[in-house]
Image: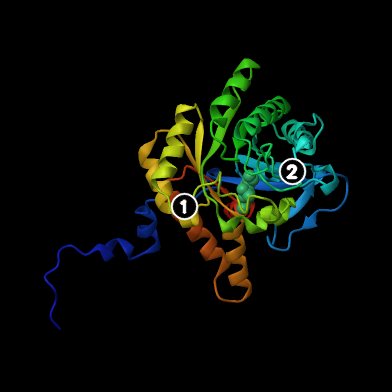
Amino acid sequence: MRRLNLPRRPRRLRRTAAIRNMVAETRLTPADLIQPYFVIDGEGAPQEIASLPGQRRLPIRELVRECEQLHRLGVPGVALFPSIEPVLKDAAGSEALNPETLVLRAIRAVKQAVPELAIVTDIALDPYTDHGHDGIFNAAGTDMDNDGTVEILRQMSLLCAEAGADFVAPSDMMDGRIEAIRESLDDAGLTETAIMAYSAKFASAFYGPFRDAVGSASVAGTNLLGKHTYQLNPANRREALLETELDELEAADVLMVKPAGAYLDIIRDVRNNTHLPLAAYQVSGEYAQLHAAARLGWLDLERCRDESLLAIKRAGADMILTYFAAEVAGCFSR
Ligand code: PBG
């Protein structure tokens, strides 16, 4: 056999598990993760969500229990999403401004039980509107009323901040909302409440199971087919950078790219373009597709789960919102 004259052999560093571990460039830990939770009212049992296997809508009492557990596992934060009764919904999403609305009671309960856990609350109207859009319509009913929606988001943010949220996270993609929310928080003396801006949020088909989980109405029956007049076109990279730059100028504390897996290039672009912390949201459809393939016996769920999260971190995310957070953190404590 002829030996190659080859001093450089990269495979030397892949020879044993110990060496591979020494040269690993990216590591995933529970501290990287944020767990989203769906909250329901009442004292009933948690409700399974068909399209999100392993995720359940939780009454506040169970939510608090899971948050305590999650904190013990080393996960630093949770994102809360209310799933309210259809009778409470209207065109203006007015339940969002009820000072005793479900999500505010959930924030208070979690803060009281686990004060160290960071709470992120979504700021958008879709859980509250009967049409399922993230904002209110203009008088003609032809498009979102951008500025009118921002006015409501300011008030929502104040309520969530006063209830104890560490981050308000506007996910609506209306123009100018970060600056407006910062101004309202500061005027109210809530200078320590941070803004995690869903900055580059794409009009994605991967949100399907989430809309099922919060029971947000299908926007299909309205004059706006889909959320394309506010969420980003999946074709656009430069526009995503522009949105993140604007949010930074408007004083966002953390930027976000969403979804994550199909937008790793955007995560890397934003990472290279800002010094702010960057979050990425591995959304419901990303979670569901791995479960579905695993159920068919086509993919190994745990390995694909870990690989998908590692890839998001490698792309440049400092924190990952993922439905796998509790489960992955559990593996670390075994
Ligand atoms: C609401 C919101 C959505 C998600 C988070 N906040 C859905 C949407 O914009 O329609 C999706 C999260 C997921 O799919 O896991 N503005």
The residue drawn where x is 76% and y is 33% is 104
In which quadrant will I find the C terminus?
Answer: bottom right
Q: Is residue 333 in view from this perspective?
A: no
Percent from the top left, x then y, of residue 29? Answer: 52, 48
Q: Which mark is residue 312?
A: 1
Distance from disc 1 to disc 2, alpha carbons, whole Å, reads 32 Å
Percent from the top left, x then y, of residue 215? Answer: 75, 52
Instruction: Count residues near mark 1 (Cα–Cα under 10 Å), then give few for <14, some for 14-19, many for 20+.
Output: many
| Relative depth, front residue between 5 and 52 | 52
Location of mark 2 (residue): 129
Percent from the top left, x then y, of residue 84? Answer: 80, 45
Q: Are marks 1 and 2 in contact (CB under 8 Å)?
A: no
The quarter holding residue 296 reads bottom right
| Relative depth, front residue between 285 and 61 | 285
| SS class, disc 2 | loop
206 left or right, relative to 216: left
In which quadrant will I find the N terminus?
Answer: bottom left
Residue type at mark 2: give it. Answer: Thr
Q: Nearer the viewer, mark 1 or mark 2?
A: 2
Percent from the top left, x then y, of residue 87? Answer: 85, 46
The residue drawn where x is 35% and y is 41% is 272
Return the disc, 1 or 2, that comes first in the chain's sequence. Answer: 2
Residue type at mark 1: give it. Answer: Ile
